[in-house]
Image (cartoon, rainbow, N blue to C red):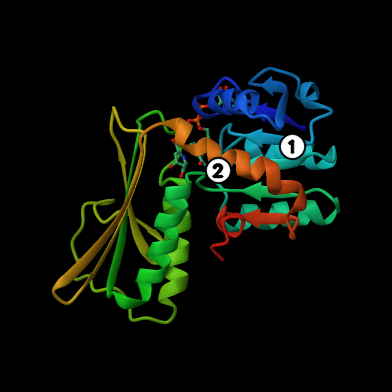
Amino acid sequence: MIKVGVFGAKGRMGSEVVKAVEAAEDTELVAGVDTGDDRDRVRGADVVVDFTHPDEVVGNLHWLVANGIHAVVGTSGFDEERMAGVRDLLAEHPGVNVLIAPNFGIAAVLMMHFAVKAAPYFDSAEIVELHHPNKADAPSGTAHRTAELVAGARGEAEPMPDATTSEVPGARGADVSGVRVHALRVAGLIAHQEVIFGTHGETLKIRHDSMSRESFMPGVLLGVRRVSQLPEQLTLGLEPLLGLD
Ligand SMILES: NC(=O)C1=CN([C@@H]2O[C@H](COP(=O)(O)OP(=O)(O)OC[C@H]3O[C@@H](n4cnc5c(N)ncnc54)[C@H](O)[C@@H]3O)[C@@H](O)[C@H]2O)C=CC1
Ligand SMILES: O=C(O)C1=N[C@H](C(=O)O)C[C@H](O)C1
């Protein structure tokens, strides 16, 4: 049995993780921790899953790593600088592993993978992410990561065509690694993203839709099962666990 703790246990994602961990045959819930609870409640866990808040997750990670507990992190907000901080932290604690996945949806990971494959063949690439209005951060962690991956796959390609000289601030979205990202917050939605590519006379749209938060659970459980055996102390994204690297 893998002993699992959950940080953010009363939240939209954390409450699903609690149910998934309780339902799986090879995992056992040690405790759920939410705001105001003592982190000590997860002592004895092999792995803790964190779905909290971008402003809280780093403090949680420091506590977990210092206490020798592997972490599976879904919370967004991990840019290059933050990743470097986690790498430094892990260097002081050999034997502890951290998996940070911007998106645990298997189809979402495939959407990012296909976008990387498509990117070198197009002049233009822009990302539209659409989420529920209770989301704390914009753009989403998934969109941020997709933009970085698409930019990397474009390599030394020409700058994207864009004749805009007059702009209402924000109208062209955020520039993430040279890729424009547009964030919509709409009641009734959960999590959705389109990557739109264009070249002469042709466009390609790659779209992913999360219809329920349950859809993230197979990916979270995969992370819980595999985090302790990952070859690197820090893994970004579910891709290597799915054989997609
Ligand atoms: N990687 C992925 O596949 C996914 C990632 N997310 C990310 O997960 C995070 C949480 O999203 P939601 O569940 O929608 O938010 P939420 O607001 O519904 O839940 C967060 C919960 O964490 C609790 N919390 C805040 N600080 C805490 C702390 N220091 N210790 C323990 N609990 C704490 C809050 O009280 C709340 O109950 C966001 O960053 C979101 O972007 C969301 C969905 C999928
Ligand atoms: O807050 C959410 O809901 C989601 N957050 C993650 C992100 O920021 O990419 C993953 C998914 O988009 C849902």
Q: Does residue 110 appear anywhere in the picture?
A: yes
Residue furthest front in the image: 25
Which of labels 2 and 1 is toward the front? 2
Measured as percent of width and height from the top left, residue 244 is found at: 54, 63
- Taking depth in this image into account, of 50 and 171 the one nearest to the observer is 50
Q: Which residue is mark 2?
A: 219
Q: Amino acid at mark 1?
A: Val
Q: Is residue 167 left or right of residue 146?
A: left
Give the quadrant of the C terminus.
Answer: bottom right
Mark pair 2, 1: CA separation: 15 Å
Q: Is residue 49 above or below residue 43?
A: below
Mark 2–mark 1 CB contact (< 8 Å): no
Q: Work out which quarter of the rendered image holds the N terminus and state it.
A: top right
| Residue at image coords 31%, 32% | 189
**Quarter location, residue 23:** top right
Q: Which residue is mark 1?
A: 47
- The picture places residue 151, in percent across and down from the top left corner, at 43, 69
Residue 74 shows in the view: no
Q: Residues within 10 Å of mark 1 (few under 14, many from 20)?
A: many
Give the quadrant of ligand 1.
top right
* Quadrant in the picture for residue 41: top right
151 in relation to 41, above or below: below
Q: Is mark 2 within 8 Å of ligand 1?
A: yes
* Left or right: 111 in relation to 71: left
- Residue 10 against residue 203 in the figure, above or below: above
Q: Residue furthest left?
A: 201
Please tell me which residue is depicted at 40% across the width and 75% down the height of the picture. Answer: 154
Helix, strand or loop at mark 2: helix
Mark linked to residue 229: none
**Picture coordinates of residue 139 (x, y %)?**
41, 47
Direction from residue 183 to residue 53 in the image, left or right: right
| Residue nearest the observer in this picture, 2 or 136 | 2
